Image (cartoon, coloured by chain):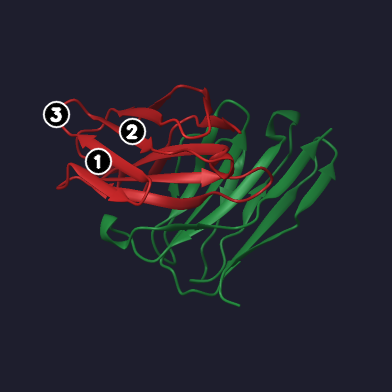
Chain colours: A green, B red
Amino acid sequence: IAGITQAPTSQILAAGRRMTLRCTQDMRHNAMYWYRQDLGLGLRLIHYSNTAGTTGKGEVPDGYSVSRANTDDFPLTLASAVPSQTSVYFCASRKGQGANTGELFFGEGSRLTVL
Amino acid sequence: GENVEQHPSTLSVQEGDSAVIKCTYSDSASNYFPWYKQELGKRPQLIIDIRSNVGEKKDQRIAVTLNKTAKHFSLHITETQPEDSAVYFCAAYAGGTSYGKLTFGQGTILTVHP
């Protein structure tokens, strides 16, 4: 079934540990995004990629890094996790780069707790 | 960069009433404005969108209006039903130097009472 897959769905980790959230889509979408969702703050953009080989910073990029080696995969890495990174993380993809390409498709989310 | 403000943060209505959620944006280069609905424990899903060359768009009980001069847009839900209860997010897609970014509002928790 075509779509966007995130892993893990839930994770608890100790502060200071390194963590990579995985995101894979099989829709051949050009643009991919990582958002974090916190109560009262909505969906805040962490990093995005308009096409394979390029990435850009969103509203809250500090403490996170991404890579886009190919069209399908867009992993998000926390180099040294801190409690303030406790959140629900959503990966999303969109067909193209321009506004005419419309809908953002979201993964099911990854709930991360940093103790 | 783009800043999207959304109001109200919570909205409670009786079944059958109308609900209106408003958003403002800061970047005059923004040209695409989608609305997403997120049910409890689920992923956000697109319900309607509007482009900057259109003032209003309707889809059954849902409509969106856009005022580019004032830089605000609104979601209107008529004849609300309990299944409309969810969190609603507006968003703005920026062009120019922020090309590729989709910025979301803070969300509105809509509760429809039977």
- Binning the other alpha carbons within 10 Å of mark 3 as few (below 14), some (14 to 19) or many (20 upward) gives few
- Binning the other alpha carbons within 10 Å of mark 2 as few (below 14), some (14 to 19) or many (20 upward) gives some
Whether label 1 touches label 3, CB < 8 Å: no
Circle 2 sits in a helix, a strand or a loop, which is it? loop
Under mark 2, the amino acid is Glu
Q: Is residue A61 visible?
A: no
Name the one closer to the observer, B29 or A49: B29
Q: Chain of mark 2?
A: B
> Mark 2 or mark 1: which comes first in sequence?
2
Q: Badge 1 is on which residue?
A: B30
- Residue B109 marker: none
> Residue lying furthest bottom in this view?
A1
Q: Badge 3 is on which residue?
A: B69
How far apart are labels 2 and 3 at the CA level?
16 Å
On the image, the x and y values in percent for residue B63 come to 32, 43
- Binning the other alpha carbons within 10 Å of mark 1 as few (below 14), some (14 to 19) or many (20 upward) gives many
**Which residue does the image show at 69% across and 46% down from the upper left?**
B41
On the image, the x and y values in percent for residue A81 come to 74, 38
Name the one closer to the observer, B32 or B11: B11
- Rendered position, A9 above or below A81: below
Q: Are marks 2 and 1 on the same chain?
A: yes
Under mark 3, the amino acid is Thr
Q: Mark 1 or mark 3: which is in front?
A: 3
Q: Mark 2 or mark 3: which is in front?
A: 3
> Mark 1 or mark 3: which comes first in sequence?
1
Q: Badge 2 is on which residue?
A: B2
Q: Is residue A26 visible?
A: yes
On the image, the x and y values in percent for residue B61 come to 38, 46
Whether label 2 touches label 1, CB < 8 Å: yes
